[in-house]
């Protein structure tokens, strides 16, 4: 006989499926970013890219809170997350590289195709996300790179050079930290990550009149992130 103890908690089930719906909404925001790119409305592109990144930043925490693996186990949350990450972190910036004036026109299609291909490799490695919560190889932050290109207004060939460097870095097995699940200097890392995000969003939404100091100050966090990632991994366990 089935007892009430064996029946799933309906509120927990609704919450778990709600988290999956929240994650899936990232596809909608990615589409809106794509439409903004076709219209060359860079401000709205930024808005939708930021919203998509916020969804991606919070859905993992919500998924653990709602215990989606138990209460909504008919959905593969990791697969859903990867699909949306490829759309929003790769496809959207690839289209941006073609439509925006940040790269030499002769290499725009080549550049877009390069990040599509290298990211396909990066996403499908069996250990792309390691057991100790790191990304192996450059973690396809192409949306972040695209935003820096837009905001910094560097020479087009300089942008192309950085893009090719990042493509090569996909194949170099450096373990980059997963900021919200990192265990080494956790409080400092989380604090700097949230500060980077908050100040960055504040600056981005003011485009095209963003304060330039915000752009340059953000490299403090970038340097910290890279430095922490390069620390020998035995140190992360300490």
Image (cartoon, helix red, strand yellow):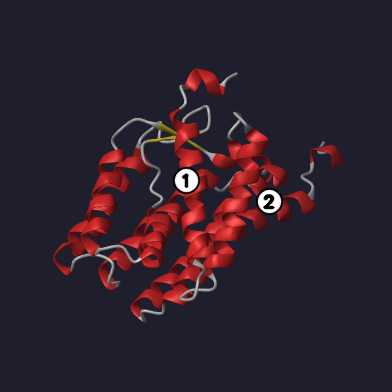
Query: Could you tell whether 47 is left or right of 86 in the image?
Result: right
Query: Could you tell whether 174 is left or right of 16 in the image?
Result: left
Q: Residue furthest bottom?
A: 39
Where residue 198 sits: x, y (%)? 61, 58
Is the residue marked by circle 1 packed among few (<14), some (14-19), or many (20+) residues within 10 Å?
few
Q: Is residue 3 visible?
A: no
Is the residue marked by circle 2 packed among few (<14), some (14-19), or many (20+) residues within 10 Å?
many
The residue under label 2 is 16
Residue pictured at 46% horizontal, 76% vertical: 208
Residue pictured at 48% horizontal, 65% vertical: 212
| Image height of 196 relative to 27, above or below | above
Where residue 32 sits: x, y (%)? 46, 73
Instruction: Using the image, tell me which numbered label, if any, was put on residue 222.
Output: 1
In the image shown, does 161 or 234 lie closer to the viewer? 161
Q: Secondary structure at mark 2?
A: helix
Q: CA distance from mark 2 to mark 1?
A: 34 Å
In the image shown, does 116 or 178 lie closer to the viewer? 178
Q: Is residue 147 visible?
A: yes
Where residue 78 sits: x, y (%)? 51, 44
């Amino acid at each position: 006989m089935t007892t009430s103890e064996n029946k799933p908690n309906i509120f927990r089930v609704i919450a778990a499926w709600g988290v999956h719906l929240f994650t899936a909404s990232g596809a909608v925001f990615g589409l809106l970013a794509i439409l903004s790119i076709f219209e060359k409305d860079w401000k709205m592109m930024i808005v939708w890219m930021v919203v998509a990144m916020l969804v991606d930043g919070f859905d993992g925490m919500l998924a653990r809170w709602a215990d989606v693996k138990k209460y909504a186990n008919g959905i593969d949350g990791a697969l859903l997350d990867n699909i949306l990450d490829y759309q929003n972190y790769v496809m959207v910036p690839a289209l941006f590289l073609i439509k925006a004036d940040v790269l030499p026109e002769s290499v725009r299609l080549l550049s877009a195709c390069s990040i599509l291909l290298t990211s396909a490799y990066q996403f499908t490695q069996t250990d792309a996300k390691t057991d100790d919560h790191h990304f192996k190889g450059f973690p396809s932050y192409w949306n972040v790179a695209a935003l820096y290109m837009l905001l910094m207004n560097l020479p087009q060939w300089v942008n192309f050079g950085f893009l090719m460097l990042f493509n090569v870095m996909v194949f170099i097995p450096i373990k980059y930290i997963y900021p919200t699940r990192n265990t080494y200097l956790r409080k400092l890392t989380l604090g700097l990550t949230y500060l980077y995000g908050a100040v960055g969003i504040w600056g981005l939404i003011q485009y095209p009149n963003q304060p330039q100091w915000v752009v340059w100050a953000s490299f403090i966090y970038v340097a910290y992130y890279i430095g922490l990632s390069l620390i020998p991994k035995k140190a992360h366990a300490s």
